[in-house]
Image: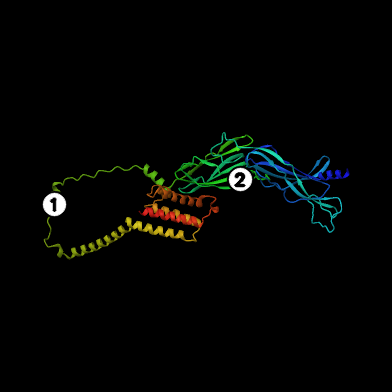
Amino acid sequence: PRSQTNQSDEKKIAFGDLIIPKKAVYVGEVVPIELRFYFDASYPVRLPDRPSFSGDGFTVMRFSKPIEKQQEVDGRVYNVVIFQTAFSAAKSGTLEIPPASMESQIQLPGRGPSGMDDFFGGFFGNMMSSGDIRQTTVPTQSVKLDVKPLPKDGRPEDFSGAIGQFSLEASAAPKQAAAGDPISLTVTVSGRGNFDAMRPPALLEDDGWRTYPPGEKFEVSPSDPIGFNGEKRFEYMLVAREDRSKTPLAQLSFFDPSLEKYVTIKSAAIEVAAKGTADQAAATVAAATPVPEAQPSPAVSAPTPEESLLASNFSPASFAPLIHDRGFLTVNGALAIAWSAALMLGLGHAVAVSPFAKKSAARRDSRRLLHKMEDAQCSAQQFFQIAEEFVHSRLASNGSHADARDLLENSSVSDETKSAVRTVLNRHDEWKYSASAPHLKLDVGERTQVLDQLKNFDHELRR
């Protein structure tokens, strides 16, 4: 009948298609797909910005901007709108991708409602005031996929979930660093895959270096409308504990679904000239400097006959007591006053540099630093800077510039206290060196906990 023919024709006015390039995927693999919606070019159409596409067991990345083109299908010309995106499966097994759908307003021939204006401007063509406006949901077909788990055989110990095809390179700046100065090691991972799930590459051969959590930045390839092609940069801050001539190596392990195996790639070590701490350098110089041999004292020779004769013939010119000599009294009185003044100054200096005086001064300084940290107006960065200064001042002696950690390990405090203080020093380094420092937070609870740990540390040192 004619009515059935009309219904069949209307079904051909618009339809959708879901295009997935492969029927078997791995868990976590990023798979690009296309959503295509066809509309008969004879009818004006208005569309929303994005189609509806979601389901259980998989995640969808962002949509590209729509691509418009015309295509002939079975002798009819269609306006086609194409959306590109990608998905990744969350678990193994059979996965059914449900249909995506696009809401549309299609103007069919006929008399439209009175009073219609140009509000329904067409996505393809312009809506006219006369015609039948149909609100239509255009679906794609559903697709079933086989999702395979990642293999256990050959899985590297440092594999953290990166899946795709990647390359890796590293750079360092500056190439020279004085004792305590950081070197920035930038590791760039390029390629295509699940960058969102990628963790920082591991650092190898890092003995003699202190490393900090890296900052991360991802840049999408200009030719990629979806966001799974690009490069991700990890910026590590390194501080040499000992003199170093090369940076650590960066290593990334990932699963390549096209090869169906795990791949491990490494960067090359970069030549640098990084000095260790000042105390270590001084110790090295001292160890290399030979100690001069002790010289024997000159022997005392016996007096000559002439010297013996001179000593035996000497006699004073007068036997009057020296106490009655005014010049003698004046000179010796002045010497006595000078000696007394020197004695008082010496005693004062001895008291000032005595161990008791030094300990008293150190306690006053420690109370001053803790008082600063207790101030609610003290910023998080200042708080940890003062904390590191406090630990160093309580452990250093004779103006030592040794690293606070080295001093801590050689201190007399308990292992539990060492662990707590070591955590405080790590937090200080995160604020000082880590590129993620602007995102770190310091709440009231942690501030109070750190103060309590430092006070306990101070108390143990006073025992």
Q: Position of residue 84 (x, y in %)?
A: 70, 44
Q: Are marks 1 and 2 in contact (CB under 8 Å)?
A: no
The amino acid pointed to by label 2 is: Asp
Q: Is residue 220 above or below residue 331?
A: above
Q: Quadrant of residue 299?
A: top left
Name the element at disc 1: helix
Left or right of residue 243: residue 148: right
Specify how the rendered protein is coloured: rainbow
The amino acid pointed to by label 1 is: Ala
Label 1, label 2: how far apart the Cα atoms are? 100 Å
Nearer the observer, 419 or 280: 419
N-terminal label among 1 and 2: 2
Q: Which residue is mark 1?
A: 311
Nearer the observer, 83 or 166: 83
Q: Quadrant of residue 118?
A: bottom right
Crowd band around label 2 with a 10 angstrom C-alpha radius: few (<14), some (14–19), many (20+):
few
Q: Position of residue 124 (x, y in %)?
A: 79, 49
Q: Position of residue 384 (x, y in %)?
A: 47, 54
Crowd band around label 1 with a 10 angstrom C-alpha radius: few (<14), some (14–19), many (20+):
few
The residue shown at (88%, 44%) is 2
Placement of the N terminus among the 4 image quadrants: top right
Q: Position of residue 411 (x, y in %)?
A: 38, 49
Q: Which residue is mark 2?
A: 196
User: Does residue 167 appear in the picture of this structure?
Assistant: yes
Q: Is residue 315 above or below residue 69?
A: below
* Residue at the right extreme of this rendering: 2
Left or right of residue 120: residue 328: left
